[in-house]
Image: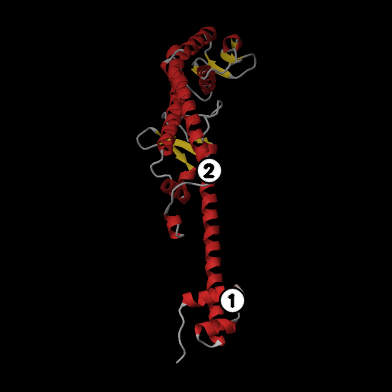
Amino acid sequence: MPKKFLPHQKKKWLELSESGKSEKWIARDAGCDPRTVKKGIEEARRERNVAIAQIELVKEALRDHKDQLLAVIDDIKSLLVMPPENIEIRIDKDGTPAPIPLSGAIIRPDESGGLMLLVRAEERVEWELLQEHLKGDKIWKIFKQWKESILACIQAMIDLKLGAERLIKARTQLELVDEIPRSAEIGCIYPAVIQLFWEVALRRSLGIKDGTNIEGRMIASPDGYVRNGPGGTELAYAPNSQEDCKNKLLDALRELYGSPEAKRVSISYKEAQELTEKAKRNWEEISLLRLVPGSCRVCRRLGV
């Protein structure tokens, strides 16, 4: 019965063969037939080639895994921006804000009546894997703080718009309507005045130079309308008292400038700016490594 040789012996034959030893020489040294040596060398070579191929596959899989995680990090970095100065905030008649799209995210009301920030990257499985890689890293605490600061900033902007509506209604004692009432004797205010006052007060709270000059542009027309400039947008309708209505609107605007809502916008915006920059720096540090420290369940399945 032919003698059986172990895998490590065949591997040794392969090494000897590649170093220049002949199959006959190896056979004499091993005390077996040259044909056995030849077959053993072929088996060892196949096993080695398979092992090399597997290593390359694992390396490629790890590269792909790294690139996927870095792509998530890039998505987060692009997300870390301040809400635009011309952000559109629409509020339903019941006071509920409509969803607000941001770069890579959306803000919408939650079940408790507050706001929640939904990040698209968080819906990907790579997000969970990234959390496993960076488990315990301070980056997650900072990211949470950033989200909270953005929500606080947006809530302050919403409150400013609601505050504008309250002040205008209180000053003018007029109802808000979408179009002029059937009775020409009934006065009203239009959504355009709330939007205009909110935009101007928002820019002022954010320290943005504003050239609107509402006080200089607003006019009381002979037809009973208060307009934003000659032939401009209709802000209110107050037949026979349009001049008085204009003055009350301007009083409401000046009060809005110094309102608690306007101050909260200014404070929350600055806090959000600081946390945005802080979060950016932390994610940029991870990105500059061009790899993600730690490991995850995918890494473990790949044997890393």
Is residue 182 at all visible to an observer of this figure?
Answer: no
| Amino acid type, residue under disc 1 in the picture | Ser
Residue that mark 1 sits on:
17
- Which one is in front, 18 or 259? 18
Query: Which numbered marker is on residue 289?
Result: 2
Is residue 62 at all visible to an observer of this figure?
Answer: yes
SS assignment at label 2: helix
Residue at image location 49% in from the left, 44% down from the top: 121
Crowd band around label 2 with a 10 angstrom C-alpha radius: few (<14), some (14–19), many (20+): few
Q: Please identify the quadrant where the N terminus is shown.
A: bottom left
Is residue 250 shown above or below 285?
Answer: above
Q: Please identify the quadrant where the C terminus is shown.
A: bottom left
Farthest residue in the left direction?
A: 112
User: Residue 275: x and y, percent?
Assistant: 46, 29
Q: Which mark lies nearer to you, 2 or 1?
A: 1
User: Residue 73: x and y, percent?
Assistant: 51, 43
Residue at image location 46% in from the left, 82% down from the top: 5
User: Residue 3: x and y, percent?
Assistant: 46, 87
Is residue 59 shown above or below 77?
Answer: below
Residue 259, by quadrant, is: top left
| Amino acid type, residue under disc 2 in the picture | Leu
SS assignment at label 1: helix
The first of marks 2 and 1 along the sequence is 1
- Which one is in front, 38 or 149? 38
- Which one is in front, 203 or 121? 121
